[in-house]
Image: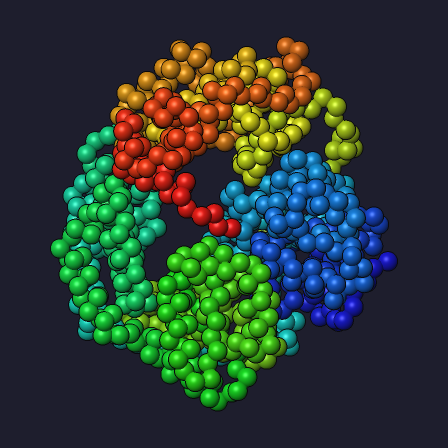
């Protein structure tokens, strides 16, 4: 028998446990009130009720996974060696071994999805599946697919969802509940009687600033550019004639509608113009937002990026914005303010606030949230000029201008913050969700965010063990004010909807309990080989849902093998056109034809294939004719991954019926010397199958190609200065890990 240790369950946790013992439950608790410990109570109960079962705890990131595993070690009597963390860094074979040996597995969802598809693990013996940050269980996120697989296969299923904020729209909350098969909601706020004794007071205050005259002058120029484009959208009848301003969401919807029209073959001038104008509006809106809420440095970086992009990009929207006289005037004014070291008044107020806090409390801990990485970098730099401030940037892994952090570095920074080596963390959205950050004295919103979820999570970083403070910085008369009130009303709406849903007893009776048929081994499953690069694709997930025996291997040719004679190459519309341009496609088609009796090409997507890239339609028609007539390979277009998966399923069933059932992966026949030479040469940048032959004809062998300088390379037709330079760069640059 397992038990908890080192903590005493609170009354509301015991009440929630009672619900979780009977039904799949969505647990909604303010940050810091012990969602993880509440889930642990249920998992211990399930392990004791179902001996030899396992617990699976899913969480979005590796740092979170490590923290939850440590919580199990600290708070339960389960042996440490029986608690494992699964991430993408652990090899599939090792995860397969750990699964068999572990009782509790804490995992990120992406790698686990692949393990389920490839049959390396089975959810059958999991007695409780916990989804941390459950509000993510919408759309195509892996939580949705895993929950469905679990409900279909587990012998004794129980699902828990944990979140501080499931969303502000009723449809979103219902989608989360539906995706996770939730039967009951347990929600607590700081106003509930059983929670109040554990709530630490959080004082919320605002610092409001005025936009300086210099900023207002720049804003007027940007709005002049913005309004001229808005008027053109009105003239084309693409937005209402009385609209004074449009939101980012409205513009994105407009773009989607116009792209759909283009995909259906509507190529009238207003559609093309509308797409470009919408993109220009988004760029100008972003510039205005940076100016109003962030300041000159962030705006200057953005402007410089647009200018650089416009020099090499063929995108008209970027060029049109950069060439706008108003934009040119903005560029000049912004550069002058950067030279004068002119700051947003928020930054001045923030420095005063931080200096005061550091001087008044020696061991103060502060988190400053800023949703723009460039601004966060600048804030960190300015704060570290203040005596006593030890600020550290805390951002995600994606490297932008050298500011990305690995997960290991993130964990190290949090540990240093906990020990006091740093007293301020300047962070983006990465620290909003789930991280078990030590008690924080002050949380600063450098800008309000128009999201109830993100606002709740930011506030939840403080007031955990002791009284906390939140300060929101707002620029009057700007998006800051609008975003603040948007989040405020969304949060009120969220709790109202949750109360309604709780009374309605969400999804009651919806879950289909597993029957004996769930556990009968199906010997007649059809078999499909899939290339390992297809991992995580929706096509694989849908095939797995349809009881396909998927074998994931490295395929030298094709993406899927339906039998020993049917090989399928799948390309989305954009990749199909790209592979024509870079020369990849013809080589792939030849390989299909030379190695399989019944090859097939599937083009997936509803976009208009003739408007994806700046390529003449006859080139696309010519390639389609070559594939179908010269090589005799059928080309089929599907709308989406579901349609693709069901087509593969149908093909494989037909092959099975015709006697092509049991087959093994056959190695690709060895390449001839000529084919090897062409293959190596075609891997150079911008060199496809056709150009590879031209190069080999000109230089006779690969050694001479490698030794050729740019001028010698340019002798070959269709190799210009750019391709020659890229080839030399690849050949001459030192390898760096």
Give the camera-side residue of 719 and 493.
719
Residue 220 shows in this picture: no
Label total for image: 0
The residue at 48%/21% (across/down) is 675
Colour basis: rainbow
Q: Is residue 262 above or below residue 143?
A: above
Determine the image quadrant of residue 646. Answer: top right
Give the camera-side residue of 617 and 676.
676
The residue at 53%/25% (across/down) is 558
Q: Is residue 135 above or below residue 604?
A: below
Residue 222 placed where, x, y %? 20, 59
Residue 533 placed where, x, y %? 55, 35
Using residue 328 as the reference point, say whether residue 158 is left or right of it.
Answer: right
Q: In which quadrant will I find the N terminus?
A: bottom right
Give the camera-side residue of 595 and 289.
595
Determine the image quadrant of residue 221. Answer: bottom left
Using residue 350 as the reference point, say whether residue 675 is left or right of it.
Answer: right
Residue 290 placed where, x, y %? 30, 63
Q: Residue furthest right?
A: 1
Residue 594 shows in this picture: yes
Q: Is residue 612 above or below residue 621?
A: below
Residue 685 placed where, x, y %? 38, 36
The residue at 75%/23% (across/down) is 523
Using residue 269 as the reference point, say whether residue 579 is left or right of it.
Answer: right
The residue at 43%/85% (across/down) is 387
Q: Residue furthest bottom?
A: 360
């Amino acid at each position: 028998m397992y038990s908890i240790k080192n903590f005493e369950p609170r009354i509301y946790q015991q009440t929630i446990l009672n619900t979780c013992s009977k039904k799949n439950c969505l647990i909604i608790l303010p940050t810091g009130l012990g969602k993880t410990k509440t889930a642990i109570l249920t998992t211990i109960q399930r392990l004791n009720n179902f001996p030899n079962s396992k617990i699976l705890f899913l969480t979005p990131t590796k740092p979170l996974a490590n923290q939850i595993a440590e919580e199990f070690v600290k708070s339960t009597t389960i042996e440490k060696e029986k608690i494992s963390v699964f991430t993408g860094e652990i090899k599939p074979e090792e995860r397969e071994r750990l699964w068999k040996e572990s009782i509790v597995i804490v995992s990120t969802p992406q790698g686990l999805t692949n393990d389920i598809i490839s049959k390396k693990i089975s959810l059958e013996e999991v007695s409780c599946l916990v989804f941390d940050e459950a509000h993510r269980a919408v759309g195509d996120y892996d939580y949705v697919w895993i929950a469905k697989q679990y409900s279909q296969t587990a012998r004794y299923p129980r699902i828990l969802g944990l979140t501080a904020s499931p969303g502000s729209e009723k449809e979103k909350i219902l989608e989360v509940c539906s995706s996770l098969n939730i039967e009951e909601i347990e929600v607590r706020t700081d106003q509930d009687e059983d929670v109040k004794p554990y709530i630490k007071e959080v004082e919320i205050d605002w610092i409001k600033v005025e936009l300086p005259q210099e900023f207002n002058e720049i804003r007027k120029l940007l709005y002049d550019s913005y309004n001229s484009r808005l008027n053109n959208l009105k003239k084309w009848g693409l937005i209402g004639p009385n609209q004074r301003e449009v939101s980012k969401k409205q513009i994105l919807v407009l773009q989607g509608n116009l792209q759909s029209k283009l995909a259906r073959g509507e190529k009238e001038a207003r559609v093309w113009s509308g797409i470009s104008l919408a993109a220009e509006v988004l760029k100008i809106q972003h510039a205005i937002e940076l100016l109003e809420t962030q300041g000159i440095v962030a705006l200057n970086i953005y402007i410089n990026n647009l200018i650089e992009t416009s020099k090499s990009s063929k995108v008209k929207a970027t060029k049109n914005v950069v060439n706008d006289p108003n934009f040119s005037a903005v560029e000049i004014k912004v550069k002058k303010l950067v030279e004068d070291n002119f700051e947003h008044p928020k930054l001045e107020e923030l420095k005063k606030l931080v200096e005061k806090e550091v001087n008044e409390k020696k061991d103060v801990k502060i988190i400053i949230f800023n949703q723009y990485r460039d601004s966060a970098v600048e804030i960190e730099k300015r704060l570290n000029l203040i005596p006593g401030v030890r600020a550290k940037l805390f951002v995600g892994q994606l490297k932008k201008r050298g500011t990305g952090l690995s997960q290991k570095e993130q964990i190290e920074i949090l540990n240093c913050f906990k020990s006091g080596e740093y007293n301020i963390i300047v962070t983006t959205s990465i620290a909003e969700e789930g991280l078990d950050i030590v008690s924080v004295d002050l949380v600063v919103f450098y800008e309000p965010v128009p999201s109830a979820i993100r606002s709740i999570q930011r506030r939840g970083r403080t007031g955990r063990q002791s009284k906390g403070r939140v300060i929101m910085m707002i620029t009057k008369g700007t998006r800051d004010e609008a975003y603040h009130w948007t989040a405020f009303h969304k949060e009120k709406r969220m709790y109202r909807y949750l109360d309604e849903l709780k009374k309605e007893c969400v999804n009651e009776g919806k879950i289909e309990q597993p029957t004996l048929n769930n556990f009968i081994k199906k010997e007649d499953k059809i078999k499909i080989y899939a290339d390992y690069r297809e991992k995580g694709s929706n096509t694989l997930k849908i095939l797995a849902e349809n009881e396909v025996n998927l074998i994931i291997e490295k395929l030298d040719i094709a993406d899927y093998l339906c039998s020993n004679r049917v090989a399928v190459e799948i390309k989305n519309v954009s990749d199909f056109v790209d592979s024509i341009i870079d020369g990849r496609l013809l080589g792939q088609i030849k390989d299909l034809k030379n190695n399989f009796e019944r090859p097939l090409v599937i083009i997936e997507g509803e976009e208009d294939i003739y408007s994806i890239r700046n390529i003449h339609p006859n080139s696309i028609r010519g390639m389609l004719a070559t594939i179908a007539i010269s090589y005799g390979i059928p080309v089929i277009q599907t709308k989406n991954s579901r349609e693709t998966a069901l087509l593969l399923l149908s093909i494989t069933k037909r092959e099975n019926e015709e006697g092509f059932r049991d087959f093994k992966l056959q190695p690709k026949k060895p390449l001839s010397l000529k084919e090897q030479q062409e293959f190596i040469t075609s891997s150079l940048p911008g060199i496809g199958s056709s150009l590879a032959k031209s190069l080999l004809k000109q230089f006779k062998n690969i050694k001479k190609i490698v030794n050729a300088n740019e001028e010698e390379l340019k002798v070959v037709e269709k190799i210009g200065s750019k391709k020659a330079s890229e080839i030399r760069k690849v050949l001459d640059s030192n390898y760096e890990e």
